[in-house]
Amino acid sequence: MKKLKYALFTGCTAKQSTPEQMMSTLAIAEKLNIELVELTEASCCGASHLQDYDDFLSLVLNARNIAYAEKHELTMVTICNTCQLNTAMTKHRLDNNADLKAKVNEKLAEVGLEYKGTSNIIHFLYAIIDDIGLDKIAEMVTTPLTQFNIAPFYGCHNIRPSELQNESHKTKESAYRPTSLDDLIIACGGQTVEYVEKNKCCGFHVELQAPKTAAILTGNAIAGAMDGNADWMVTPCPLCHLKLDTQTHHASQAIGREVKLPVLHMQQMIGLALGCSSEELGLKHHVTKVDFI
Amino acid sequence: MSTSNITTQKVNFKVFRFNADEDYLPYYEDYNMDVTSEEVVLDILNRIKWDHDGSFSYRRSCRHGICGACAIKVNGRSTLACKENMSTMIELFGSELTIEPLSIKRAVKDMIIDKGDFWEKHDAIHPYLISDVDEHPEHEHIVTPEEADRLLEADLCIQCGACHYACPALEVNDRFLGPAAFAKAYRFEADVRDQARNERLQELHSEEQGIWDCVKCFECAEVCPKDVNPIDKITKLHLMLFKEGVATSNVATRHAVGFKHSIAKHGMLDEGGLVLYSEGPGIVKHIPVALQMFRKGKIVMPWNMPKSDNLDEIQKLIKSSSTAKF
Ligand code: SF4
Ligand code: SF4
Ligand code: FES
């Protein structure tokens, strides 16, 4: 298989509160023969909050991040749904507005950079499906996850707004009936769980300012997966992961029902199926214990 | 007209039925029908009434996607019945379709809901132009095309409620005004003739109505049949709050501003630092979760905080590009 090469935008979470996400990303990249060039110069994308305060600054910083991927002449892969949205939205706005692009480039010129619009920005989930393919993944599986019912949790910013997401990847995804993660579960040998909350919001972005709203949404999501008889959940978003993994106590209180399920990053699920060890995948870093291995 | 491209397909409709005057609980009725590719969802509602059960009730008026009356849910997705093609629905969900009102808990009769909460919230934002108009003007009030452009798509809203009843924040938080009301508020905030901009903004910022409670899920942008993109308007209102000096210091505003401080210091976001900056003394309530995370190696200590390479570049750009003050 031809070696794939991408510029990796890690985002901040993989470097702090989800170290297991970074570990499992690197572990599966090796198995899948993918070379990742980490964009160590990149800044935070603003996580959809900086743009509420200073939209232009958010554009400049995101354009700077993309400019570094362009310098490497590589496609940028993201491993966080919100990083994907903010970066892809910046690209969309700059590529469709010459004036704005010129204004942003005027700033970037001050530090010797230029945003050209030459690099694609794609979430790792879709890069794997588009560039390697589900059939190939299925062929590479050494430890099929046959005994597990796995509940996919998509996360808003990978599926909405749909026209933006479908600009970056070839895999056709519907905001109302997304299939990529379900297909990946099946490729890894598992059974996928159907439940209404799978494409709903986890509440992460208002955890501080509207904790009750956030906790109910988290609780409903885990409860939906539990009612679907899931053994565990899987998500491509580290922010959804944090919410579902660490907030079970608040979520249970908010919906008046004990809810708890192990929640794996999509990279960890792939890693398990490809025979990576639980140490390589950082499974000990979960707050809700991963007790099925 | 050639009919050669029209295809027909069998579809099983599971239709929500409820009459608040007679029924204790709602129930679902099955209707199997042959659906042609050129029909819209409203045609199906009509055929249920005309061919199967005359008591079936729903709202519709214009049949042109402009009155907003006919919005319902198909397989959980808010849909404007007269605009949505059956072929799209079948492509999206297959041949088992569940037809429900926009809000089950507000159902009055079948598809008809009590939209009172929608209108109350709509009224709460003063959805009209507030301006001292000279009774004997000497010339017209000219709005330039550029000024009119600022309204963006916000004035295209037909008040169908599709976004309102799709919004997960509203579903669990009654106080939240919801995407349609905020989009409407933006429509007047962006109007150069309006003179109540500051007052309206202050109302939107008040905790009771919770403009900061939007979870940023983009459901409203996805469902809106008129491409109003309410979340985009909510973001613009947030920006206006800061720009017009209306924003006061609270968890939500500090949360947005905290990103700039953190990026200026580290390039990356300092996750723990942001929670502290946003919450202030309120951080104590996060201690139990933080301790659990710490035990699992999920908290980075300040002295180990990762920094972006070429941080000086980031700092220079923040200095020269940032215009917002708080
Ligand atoms: S983006 Fe905000 S306003 Fe729109 S549906 Fe989601 S929570 Fe509601
Ligand atoms: S914003 Fe769109 S979806 Fe919401 S009420 Fe207006 S037209 Fe309907
Ligand atoms: S009948 Fe008027 S919008 Fe559908």
Image: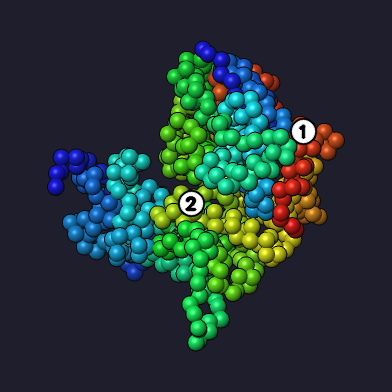
- Decide: is B96 above or below B166: above
The reply to whether dot 1 and dot 2 touch (C-beta < 8 Å) is no
- What residue is shown at x 59% (from left), y 47% (from top)? A100
- Is residue B112 visible in the rendered structure shown here? no
Amino acid type at circle 2 is Ala
Residue bearing mark 2 = B221
On whether ligand 1 comes within 8 Å of the CB at mark 2, the answer is yes
Q: Residue at x 41, y 67 (%)?
A: B114
Left or right, A17 with reference to B232:
right
Rendering quadrant holding ligand 2 = bottom left
Q: Quadrant of the C terminus of chain B?
A: bottom right
Q: Is residue B124 left or right of residue B252?
A: left
Mark 2: give few (<14), some (14-19) or many (20+) Cα within 10 Å. Answer: many
Residue projecting furthest to the bottom: B136
The tag on residue A8 is none
- Residue B129 appears in the picture as rendered: yes
- In this picture, is B139 found above or below A226? below
The kind of secondary structure element at disc 2 is helix
Around disc 1, counting alpha carbons within 10 Å, would you say few (fewer than 14), some (14 to 19), or many (20 or more)? some
**The quadrant where residue B156 appears:** bottom left
Q: Residue furthest top?
A: A1
Task: Name the residue beneath numbered marker 1.
Answer: B310
Report x, y in % for residue B319: 77, 47
> x%, y% of residue A266?
57, 29
Instruction: Determine the CA span between mark 1 and mark 2.
Output: 37 Å
Q: Are the numbered discs 1 and 2 placed on the same chain, yes or no?
A: yes
